[in-house]
Amino acid sequence: MQAQRATGNRGRAALRVALSHYVANGLSVAFGLMLISGGVHLLLGTLAASAAAVGVIVSAPPDLPGPRRGKFWQMLPSPLIGLPLFFFVQLLHSAPLRLGLLLVPATFLAFVAMAWGKRGIPIAIAVMFSMIFSMATPAPTGMAEALQRTLHFGIGAGLYVIYAVLANHALNGRYRVQAMADVLLSLAALMRTEARQFTPRDDSGDVREVPAPLLGQLLREQAALADQLQATRDIVLESPRTPRRQRLAGMLVLVLELRDLLLASELDLDALKAHPGHAAALYEMQRVLDELADETEALADTLLLGRQPAPVPDRRPELAAIHLEDEDAPPPAGHVGPTPAMLARGLASRIGHINDEVLRLVALARGDVEPDLTVVRANWQMFVSPTEWSLLPFLTLWRWDAPPLRHAIRAALAVATGYAIAVMLPWGSHDYWILLTIVVVLRGSLSQTLERRDSRVAGTLLGCVLAVGLLSTHPSPLGMLAAVTVAQAIAHGFAVRRYLVTSVAATVLGLLQAHMLSVGMSPTFALFERVADTLIGAALAWAFCYVLPSWERSQIPALVARTLTAQARHARLALGLGQLRSVVTSPELEWRLARREAYDSLSALVQATQRSLSEPRAVQPPLEPLEHLQAHSYQLLAQLSAVKSMLVLRRDRLTPAEIEGPLARTAERIEAAIGSTPTTGPVMPESAPATTLAGPIPLPDPFDNDVSPWLLRRLDLATAIAAQLRDDAARILQPLATNVPKTKTA
């Protein structure tokens, strides 16, 4: 039975991959390659088709699922810059020294494009491909042949830009659905991780000890979800004018609310675990969360398959029936604060809110309810990434400590060294493979480079075997075109998700493309040649990570400051009462933007900390206080999410006169603690921060009485966490300011 379940899970996972937006995008790119190169083959012949295919391959990296707006301007830079570089490499093909003098500065300028972040990376790679694949062609016999090849390259590149814009427009509706399904699958995975926290302490130990492995997993999943949500916003929130688009946009808004509710669901969990009769209640809550995750996954699957989602049961009655084994026992003498029974009911109630949102998600997908898109329709531009190109990243690049500038210099030096080695090797006529390996392996951080290095070497070994086996069958030109098309689909589709798969397919693609450009190449020799070139290129990429390095510790102070500033602004807006009047008021919109920045800034800090784990211990930032700061930021978001939930969902059971003053004072105290630039002065970890409550007050049953005392308790806890954040920041910044390496790990 267990084996059958595992097989079924693998089958569902494979189906989800096959129906995903990145596979659809890979197939779209491959179809464009086949259409353009096939057409050129029929009209102009095999060699012209090979050059046109290079133009397609060079133009393809920026072709990723995205909004229709700005697609043409995203696609244009690659062929616009790549075309003259392709031509100049053709002219200098037989002059190694002059070719090297072109490659090195061109590499520097190409990698400068990475200053534009995720938008610039594929353009930098595409520009490098234009030079490297031009090197893969035989030396032209003269100016006429160089111009002819460049013309065919330009035909392929130009036609592909037009094709990519049209294909993205045609697939936009499908991309919206696929991106939404992908987010739902990630949300379901986050639900399962949250559910693991409800494992009784008797079975697993204290899973909430900070920093704990499970908390680290939650932070990484939250960081990944934050990146994924922004990419999905860019597609789903673009022009939500039709009913179908509006339903998807409404579902995305609900996912954002669900993320907050999941955060709040773990509050008071530690206190309940300390109660002897907690096990059965926690198991029930865990079961409900796992079932809600199953239903979220099922909803994602129905979206991918284009089916009508089935109705899901309301689990409120099950949650209402949860109780502790001895909940009627009187609290011990001197007990202050909520009783275990109240905590259990509160936890069940917060899971009930998650249940309600999952019901709304399914109802929206079914079309049973109409989405509330007042905010999204009126202000969607505020929540999506800009599509215009700005000169600001380029103008702010020219600082010696700027990571993109150092990476561009590093890449230029690596390519220069790789080219010099390639020219001196016995197989120097195929020197481009070393440079190709450097370009695809070398990344801005050591951790990313190490991951790419290992995948590239393993993928090249497998890809060489596959390519040599295919070439040994002496396929026809059309057979070669079909194989190149399949390899392009796989290489492009998995470039972001699974680079090992991309490396295998890209190796096959590169060898087949080189064979088409240079008829007569020996497939047997290519196996050993490519493996050796790959090992050399991977070793150079790894070695040059230590040249002008941009260690993560240099970025940590700015990321910490950004995180604390975002947390303080989010607290100030989340604790305001103005946004309760209407969801279209300015305070509500400001809060939504502040919430996004709070998650995004924490995500950037989590990812930088994770990357630093691969760096030499001597240059690592102070990891233990970093992990504590991330945990406390996560907890502050959870407390504020609970407060926001009470203000919105239970405001009819609040007493405004009792909470308005504490809300304002809490916002001021959090702002005072973390809202300004963190100090690097002495830390006073034992000092007690000012709190909202003068002392313990009785907490009534939250289901039968006014919940204002419970809201005040949340405010008190949020104030205390803000003070901990301040101290965490000081412990991080002190050693960085004095340049004293901190190597202790948690």
Image (cartoon, grey):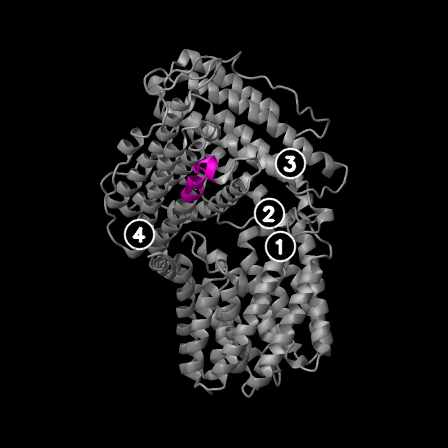
Q: Which of 266 and 574 is in front in this view?
A: 266
The N terminus lies in quadrant: bottom left
Q: Tell me the mark number nearer the camera, choosing from 4 and 1.
A: 1
The C terminus lies in quadrant: top right
- Distance, label 4 to label 1, CA atoms, is 35 Å
Horizontal side, residue 168 vs residue 133: left or right:
left
4 or 3: tag closer to the N-terminus: 4
Q: Which amino acid does label 4 sit on?
A: Leu
In the rendered image, which residue does mark 1 sit on? 447
- At mark 3, the secondary structure is helix
CB contact under 8 Å: marks 4 and 1: no
Vertical comparison of 147 with 322: above or below:
below
- At mark 4, the secondary structure is helix
3 or 1: tag closer to the N-terminus: 1
4 or 2: tag closer to the N-terminus: 4
- At mark 2, the secondary structure is helix
CB contact under 8 Å: marks 2 and 1: yes
The residue positioned 69% from the left and 42% from the top of the image is 744
Q: Which of 697 and 48 is in front in this view?
A: 697
Q: What residue type is labelled 2?
A: Gln
- Distance, label 4 to label 3, CA atoms, is 42 Å
In the rendered image, which residue does mark 2 sit on? 610
- Distance, label 2 to label 1, CA atoms, is 9 Å
